[in-house]
């Protein structure tokens, strides 16, 4: 895995059903040095994760059909992608939702209203944390 600070662009997969939010994130994170991929729903996100093996995944909780908790659990059960850090994005600060997200396998849970710079730093932290993990 690479980080934007080591001369290579880290790839971030954004899985979110809100086009305005994904467009904003794509532009903002690209300015922070990330290569950004977007999936507009859970099944497409799972497929993109397996196909592209991103360095980190930003995952919305509330999506129609397959919510972020289910997507996170499926990612953690798949040997090909279970090592990828997952940052769950939520619109509400609800401790019960946060606990459920961590139980599903999230590395970080944060509010969607963060500044792009803070979010970029969280992604870098998650990627760095993944590098330190022992390989399975």
Image: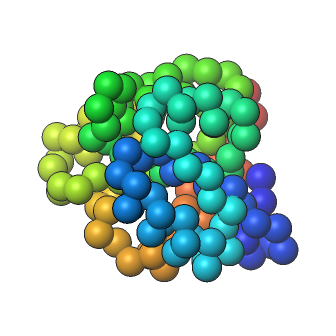
Answer with the quarter of the image where residue 67 lies: top left
For the rendered model, the colour scheme is rainbow
Residue at image position (68%, 30%) is 50
Residue 86 located left or right of residue 2:
left
Q: Quadrant of residue 68?
A: top left
* Residue 135 in view of the camera: yes
Please provide percent x and percent y for residue 59: 43, 46
x 81%, y 72%: residue: 6
| Viewer-proximal residue among 45 and 105 | 45
Residue 9 lies, in percent from the top left, at: 76, 66
Residue plotted at (55% across, 20% down): 77
Is 9 drawn above or below residue 64 in the view shown? below
Q: Is residue 123 left or right of residue 116?
A: right
Residue 58 is situated, as x and y percent measured from the top left of the image, at: 48, 51
Q: Is residue 11 above or below residue 50?
A: below
**Residue 122 visible, this orientation:** no
- Which residue occupies 52% across, 75% down? 28
Q: Residue furthest front?
A: 19
């Amino acid at each position: 895995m690479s980080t934007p600070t080591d001369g290579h662009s880290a790839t971030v997969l954004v899985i979110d059903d809100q086009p305005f939010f994904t467009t904003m994130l794509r532009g903002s994170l690209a300015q922070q040095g990330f290569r950004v991929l977007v999936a507009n729903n859970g099944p497409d996100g799972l497929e993109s994760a397996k196909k592209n093996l991103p360095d980190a995944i930003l995952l919305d909780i509330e999506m129609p059909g397959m919510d972020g908790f289910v997507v996170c659990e499926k990612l953690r059960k798949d040997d090909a992608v279970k090592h990828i850090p997952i940052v769950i994005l939520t619109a509400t600060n609800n401790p019960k939702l946060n606990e459920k997200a961590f139980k599903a396998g999230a590395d970080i849970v944060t509010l969607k209203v963060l500044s792009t710079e803070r979010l970029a730093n969280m992604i870098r932290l998650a990627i760095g944390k993944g590098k330190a993990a022992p390989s399975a």
